[in-house]
Image (cartoon, rainbow, N blue to C red):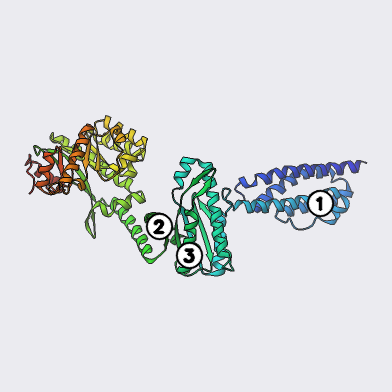
Amino acid sequence: MEEVTLKSRVVAFAVFACAGMAVLVLLAPFHAMDDRSTIALMVTTIACGVTGQIWALRRRRRVAGTIDLAIERIAAAAGGDLDSPVPSEISKRMPPLAKAMASLFKQFDSDIEGVRRSAGVDLVTGLPNRGHFRDAAESALAASGAAGLFFIDLDRFKAVNDTLGHARGDMLLAAVAGRLRVVAEEVIAHSATPPLVGRLAGDEFTLLLPGIDDDAAAARVGRSIQRALSKPFPIDGESVEIGGSVGVALAPRHGRSLGELMRAADLAMYQAKAEGRGGVVHFSATLAAAAADRARLDEELRRALANDEFTLVFQPQIGARDGALVAVEALLRWQHPEDGPRLPATFIARAEESGLIVEISDWVSAQVAETLVRWDATGTSPRLAINVSQRELDLAPFVRRLHNAIRRTGAPATLLEIEISESLAMRCTDEALAALALLRADGVTIAVDNFGTGYSNLARLSELPIDRIKLDRSLTEHIASRAEARIIAHAVISLIHGLGCEAVAEGIENGAQANVLRVIGCDVLQGYAVAPPMDEPTLRLWSRGQPQRLAG
């Protein structure tokens, strides 16, 4: 009777430990452990519990050998052996324990396999996630050698997510996955090797088609993807239209490894977006050369910052009526060691894309602050205007860095002017507008540049913290020769004055343009007819001739 009681205690504890291990199995996906570590943790927990009871029984010779066998088998399971049977001696001497151990090992093996499968699946779409896709794609590439890789980035998905909410955004992602599966099934009908569909991250999907190695076949698949994504998606009672940009790369032509192929398809996809979205672009030598050029330019810009290769030149702005110097716009130049002086149009866009614009703008801010200190010491300082990158304005730290530069040098804020583009002024964030208002409160002048090139909302324009508006040269180019151009420029200047701002015309190339602008009420003129951009010593000499006469 006592032996039965002791056996029951052992079996009961084993069952209790099994229940505890079931909890650990459920928690395993949330721990950064591999399968072997997970098994070891789970089985060792059982071993600890059972061992406490085992040692109480070791004095009993009839079960001592059986217990030793059980410990050895549990230790083997802790090492990863879940397949070997439970020793027959345990089944003979302690059937309930043997049965519990066999059931436990079987359940562990099943649960771990389930964890392994679920860890590679994207929960929103049910597609393989990035890691699982890469593993499967590498195997497929090794087996076939030839394959087509398609990178798909959804167009306008962010707008859907923002307006309809993340729940509906997830529904849309799941619907996209379903349509991509359909495209894949169509390919299966014409291929012995099944394709792979995966979700890389966010709204980026990918499709690998083993066996495809020519442009025509890849183009057909690209068009199928395009058609599938261009049709409206019914999402919770809403009809949602998005579309997608597709980049295509072929192995082995564009890369033999998966990494090379993914980089090529990614470049092609970004080119599709740059061309207006909704298109299919195949990787090419031209794209590869452009990518190499961008990488080289990035490296040269970093070197330019390190070697102090940037400089500022200054273009004057004068009063339209009296010719007096009103302000000076600081313009960036790059003294390239091989190419000579380079204009911002050749490098600013790339600097904005790469993020190097932050460091370049910091350099400009520091130089402008030091320049203002020098000019203020003479007592005849004009305002000094700088252009602000859109990327900078949207970053809250920009204002702090600008303030720090002014305070560190003691530069007078009243002599600083910041110019932002019209398109940026229409869509900059409330945080950016608040930052501009703070700068303006410190005495900084705020100007809107390139006015007339965007789509201004007059109500929003009236709410902006601005002092000056600069007419784009497209509004002033033909005012001396075309009556309609004069009418439009006159109306725009009247609008600017109605907003309580000063009107500045840039790009003035001759005296005839200046005379018309003066008559229709423009306040300030800037352009080569006034003066070209010049270095600081030349500007100092030029300003001694104030007021200035316009060039013919």
Q: Which of marks 3 and 2 is in front?
A: 3
**Secondary element at image label 1:** helix
> In this rendering, is residue 342 above or below 378?
below
Q: Which mark identifies residue 271?
A: none
Q: Earlier in the sequence, mark 3 or mark 1?
A: 1
Query: Is residue 132 left or right of 423 when viewed as pictured?
Result: right
Relative to 194, does residue 51 appear above or below in the rendering? Answer: above
Q: Residues within 10 Å of mark 1 (few under 14, many from 20)?
A: some
Q: Where is residue 137 in the image (x, y as percent from the top left)?
A: 55, 62
**Residue type, label 3:** Arg
On the image, numbered disc 3 is attached to which residue? Answer: 220
Determine which residue is flagged by label 1. 68
Three-letter amino acid code at the position of disc 1: Asp
Q: Where's residue 173, x and y in %?
A: 53, 49
Residue tagged 2: 272
In the image, 54 versus 300, the foreground residue is 300
Q: Is residue 17 left or right of residue 458?
A: right
Please name the residue shown 21% across and 44% down the image: 330
Q: Which residue is drawn at 54% across and 55% down?
A: 179
> At which x and y percent is residue 288?
38, 63
Image side of residue 302 versus residue 249, left or right: left
Q: Viewer-nearest of labels 3 and 1?
A: 3
Q: Report the residue at 33% width, 56% height from top.
A: 299
In the image, farthest residue toward the right: 1
Rendered location of residue 320, percent (x, y): 12, 39
Label 2 environment density (alpha carbons within 10 Å; few <14, some 14–19, many ≥20): many
Question: Can you say which quadrant of the picture contains the N terminus?
Answer: top right
Q: Distance between the residues labelled 3 and 1?
A: 66 Å
In the image shown, does 431 or 65 lie closer to the viewer? 431
Task: Confirm whether residue 198 shows in the render.
Answer: yes
- Snapshot quadrant of residue 131: bottom right
